[in-house]
Amino acid sequence: MIVVFTVTLAILAAAALLTMVRLLRGPTTLDRITALDVLVILVVCGVAVYVAINRDGSNIPLVAAVALIGFVGSATAARLVERGERHR
Amino acid sequence: MRRRLPQLFWLTVVWVLLWGTLTPTTIIGGIIVAALVTWLFPLPPMPDTVPFRPLRLLGLAGFLAFDLLRSAVDVAWETVLHGPRARAGIVSVPLLSGSARAVALLAGSVALTPGSYVLQIDRARGTFWVYTLGLRREGDVERVRHAMLVLQRKVVAAVGTAGELADCDRGLAAGTEKTP
Amino acid sequence: MTVVDVVTAVLLLGGALSCLLGALGLVRFPDVPARLQAATQPQTLGMVLILVGTAIRLEFESAATLLLVALFQIITAPVISQIVGRSAYRAGTLRRDDLVVDELADPMARDDAPVRDEPPDSGRGR
């Protein structure tokens, strides 16, 4: 089983690296917002795998909190961009 | 107030599930939070009541789950094969129901499937526009339009009233010549 | 390995692969809407698979919370996709020469008011 967990975490890490490329390269704010949203989801996935390894539910509030805060953050940032366009 | 009771109930259930323990403290805390939320952010009143159709809702959920998997594979294919040369398009689809509930659920469903989302909805003109990734062949536009009509029929069947469902079927029977 | 182990392994690996393909799409696709589509929805699918795969290994209380998080993700993902997608179209980041067909171009031009604070149809699709 530990092989499965290691491979899963490795794939998630690779995905996070690719996402970082888009986050750094941009070019638009919307690209970065999308990339950040994806990164938050990857963090949630990583913590979930950690929970699965230890069979210990004490980190689950972390999963819930990060997922919800990630949503609020992305939605707020995207709204801000949409609003900003009007004044250009 | 009667309308708010189900909301109170569900919000309390969510709160208790979030805590993961069923104790008097979480139940009372949940009721307080639910009351605050429904008081601070009231939902707009819905003019009509819809019969609860669990089977059709489940059917829609199953259809969406299958659709999600299939279009995930499609988009993955497009990513690996074409990548920077990806082709997309914006397709107009006749809107068969004006009900806010159906339109909201429809937009959510389309946005959930990889490769497509609703770009704009014009309820007055009875049309919505869908952005779709991976349009290549000649018939792809019509195929997307047809898939959207089928999805719409399922959504209205799940959350629409009998009258709306009849309207929807009439629109479907009239075919796609309504397309602007 | 028990049956639960096998199911968890399939769900976790499938979910992680879906996340990776989404991230690959995020890097490879040419414009914002395509990247958004390639990235967010496969990520959502991957996350739901991983959460379910984890949930079946836990006792009921913890599993319920995880499934609730998966449900939240399914409800909230379209919201982000919707807002970012609309902004991308209106900001003109969409590469028109890559579009096979743009049936929205005319009505939008006719309205000539692509960005309003609260369009009449807002609140539906978000």
Image (cartoon, coloured by chain):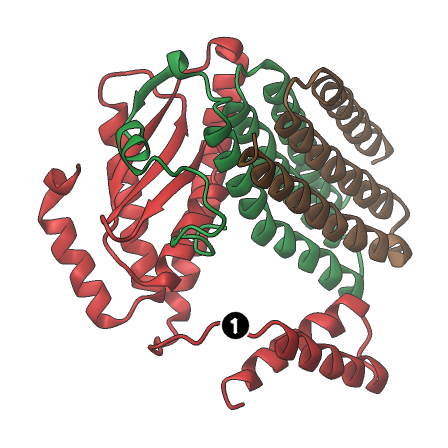
| Disc 1 residue type (three-letter) | Leu
Q: Which residue appears farthest toward the bottom when viewing the image?
A: B2
Residue corresponding to mark 1: B43
Locate residue B107, reporting x and y percent.
42, 48
Q: Which residue appears farthest toward the front when viewing the image?
A: A87
Q: Which chain is brown?
A: A
User: Residue at 60% across / 36% down in the picture?
Assistant: A84
Up-down relation of residue C58 to residue A31 (above or below): below
Q: Is residue B23 left or right of residue B141?
A: right
User: Residue at 90% across / 47% down in the picture?
Assistant: A54
Q: Which chain is red?
A: B
User: Residue at 78% across / 86% down in the picture?
Assistant: B28
Locate residue C126, reporting x and y percent.
50, 50
Which residue is nearer to you in this view: C79 or B53?
Answer: C79
Q: Which chain is green?
A: C
User: Residue at 53% across / 14% down in the picture?
Assistant: C30
Q: Is residue C61 left or right of residue B122?
A: right
Residue B87 occupies quadrant? top left
Which residue is nearer to you in this view: A74 or B81?
Answer: A74
